[in-house]
Image (cartoon, rainbow, N blue to C red):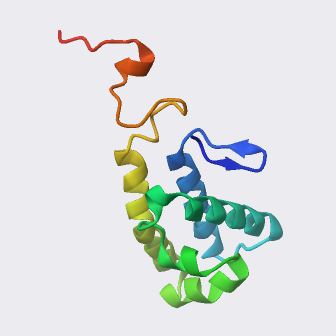
Amino acid sequence: MPLALDDTIFDNDLDAWLRLQDILLSAVEGARDAELDHEYKELRRIVLDDDIYSEAIPGFVRRHRDLGSLWPTLKSFAPQWEPRRVEVRRQFENALDIAERLGISSRPSNAPSGYDSSAWTGATKSLS
């Protein structure tokens, strides 16, 4: 099921995870306005509620409920913003890998996981 954020429904989990990463990449540069903070809180809640990703959620996301409390941790990654960005990306690798590996990024929301695509598309593979 695609992750829903207020009025926005992401096409897939990968898009939602990439959006959360983008928010944090902006935050490492100091962007922590009310709109970003609200979006962070909503996405954080959604990913924490999804058991598929329980082991892959970066620890700093798990520990910090808002961008304001997260800022000291982000600053502690490095004095400059670019190494902070690298660290955020590094810590998101597991979740992004899971989303891609499980096929969530390409599976229609109504497609059962673990089934061959022909079961829900009707299309068969051509062996030519």
Quadrant of the image occupied by residue 7: top right
- Residue 30, how many percent across, how many down? 68, 78
What is the residue that sits farthest to the left in this orientation? 128
Q: Mark yes or no: residue 51 visible.
A: yes
Q: Nearer the viewer, residue 36 or 94?
A: 94
Quadrant of the image occupied by residue 125: top left
Q: Nearer the viewer, residue 77 or 122?
A: 122
25 to 5, vertically: above or below: below
Q: Nearer the viewer, residue 1 or 57?
A: 1
- Residue 85, how many percent across, how many down? 50, 72
24 to 53, vertically: above or below: below
Q: Would you say 49 lies left or right of 120 here?
A: right
- What number of labels is visible? 0
Q: Report the residue at 43% width, 60% height from top.
A: 95
Q: Report the residue at 37% width, 54% height from top.
A: 97
Q: Report the residue at 49% width, 78% height from top.
A: 59
Quadrant containing the C terminus is top left
Q: Report the residue at 74% width, 65% height from top.
A: 36
Q: Mark yes or no: residue 78 visible.
A: no
